[in-house]
Amino acid sequence: MTRVETRWQSWLTGLPIGSPRPPRPVVKPLEMPLLRAWIMPLALIFGTPVIALLIAVSVLHQKGEVSTSLFQVVLLPRPSVWALGVIAGWLSFQAVLLRWLPGRESLGPVTPAGERPAYRLNGMAAWAISHVAVLAAWFAGTFSATSFYRQYGELLVTLNVLALLFCVFLSWKGRYWPTGADTVLTGLWAFDFFQGPELHPRLFGVQLKQLINCRMSMMGWSVTWLVMLLAQYEQTGAASPGMVASTVVLVAYLAKFFWWEDGYFGSIDIIHDRFGYYIAWGVLVWVPAVYCLPAFWMVEHPSTLSAPAAGLVALLGLVSIAVNYAADAQRQRVRATDGQTTIWGRPPELIRAPWVSGDGVSRSSLLLVSGWWGISRHFNYVPELALAFAWTVPSGFTHVLPWFYWVFLLILLTDRARRDEKKCAAKYGDAWVEYCRRVRWRILPWVY
Ligand code: NDP
């Protein structure tokens, strides 16, 4: 058995010197229709950057004028040294917080190959420090929210170039220096690049999905929204009640995300999706471009919501966050206690679903059939859509682009529920059929 021998090998695999080196993945050809193997991945790899950048830039710099910007790629800002500095600074800052802030270690769910990735749980502290740092810089006058807003297009274009290079690196690393045994290659290069080879890649000892998805992207989303509120304040001398309401909902949603970060390590992004273009480029470019559209829009189009209406919107958003959290937490709690808990004051109704991991070991998981998980099989997606509605509605109905994210989320979650159920059906077989028989609806009872 070969071992990790040098410091470089240790950095690349993310494993300590002397530990066994995971074998290079064997290429396992997959029988797939042409559409899934080539056409879809290539269309998305070439199409999504154009869509994300043009829509974001048209909202940021063209007042939403799609007609003058959508087909004029030449109008896109150019990558800049300023943007490179901001990205490098943010990444380093988040890496330092992740690595050195105190926090207990948490083990993620067992992977198909029987491994358990470890994470450091210090997300809440990192969230607090990141927001305080930005606010302190703004109050001290060393940071201009308006110039950040004006240069945001450059930032996105630069991020796009870096994210594509990063995806190439991930493909190379997975092929030659994988971190673990959960590495898959099909030999169909467009598909492999799109899906990515590794499930839990590490670099310099850091879990890349935790650093990039959570700390760089989700944290960046929250801070960017806050900066847009500050930019509106700088430009108009006030923040509109609608902008304040949407910022409260968004920032609370992401605070909840970090409060529940170990729950995210059991979500589909982490346990099912590999780290390639779909996830890595998605969180590095699609999130900062598309997820922030309502905030970009509101900087120069202040919300016309009255203070009481904005209060109601904030209330809708906060209640939806609480329901979404409660649904995710129920599932997590039932599994963590092996069913020795109560759901809405009663013992949980459960199905014990057996499955066999890739290393041949027989295992079992609990499927919760009561509480939120008894209403529908993905009820957590209903409040997810409601809370996104709450932070979008202050941007009004005069333009369609601020709603792009909400429509995208509706399509994403509908497709995600279908993909997830396909995975669960293959993993659990009869137990999943039994769950679907007892809980009939997929997302919204009597509708879907
Ligand atoms: P879920 O939290 O819905 O988890 C799905 C997994 O849970 C399944 O793969 C299965 O995993 C397990 N599971 C399924 N049914 C049951 C059950 N009855 N009891 C116990 N476990 C079950 O997945 P997501 O990753 O989609 O969502 C996580 C959170 O992220 C949600 O709050 C969602 O709203 C949010 N989200 C936000 C998005 C955004 O862009 N804003 C996008 C997607 C999600 P196993 O193999 O372990 O059994």
Image (cartoon, grey):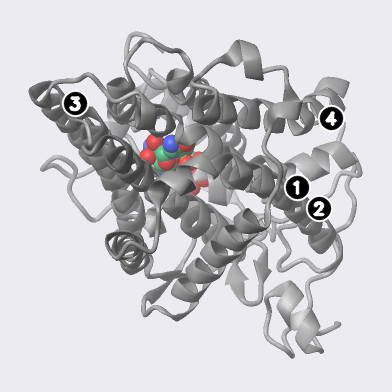
On the image, the x and y values in percent for residue 77 come to 67, 38
User: Which mark's residue is nearer the viewer, 4 or 1?
Assistant: 1
Which amino acid, mark 3?
Val
Residue contact between numbered discs 1 and 2, judged by CB atoms under 8 Å: yes
346 vs 410: above or below: below
Q: Is mark 2 within 8 Å of ligand 1?
A: no
Query: Which residue bears the numbered disc 4?
Result: 37
**Quarter residue 208 falls in:** bottom right
Report, in whole angstroms, how far the alpha carbon at label 4 lies from the one at label 1: 20 Å
181 vs 40: above or below: below
Front residue of 108/323: it is: 323
Query: Which residue bears the numbered disc 1?
Result: 164
Assign the C terminus to one quadrant of the image: top left
Report, in whole angstroms, how far the alpha carbon at label 4 lies from the one at label 2: 18 Å
User: Which mark's residue is nearer the viewer, 1 or 2?
Assistant: 1
Front residue of 258/394: it is: 394
Element carrying mark 3: helix
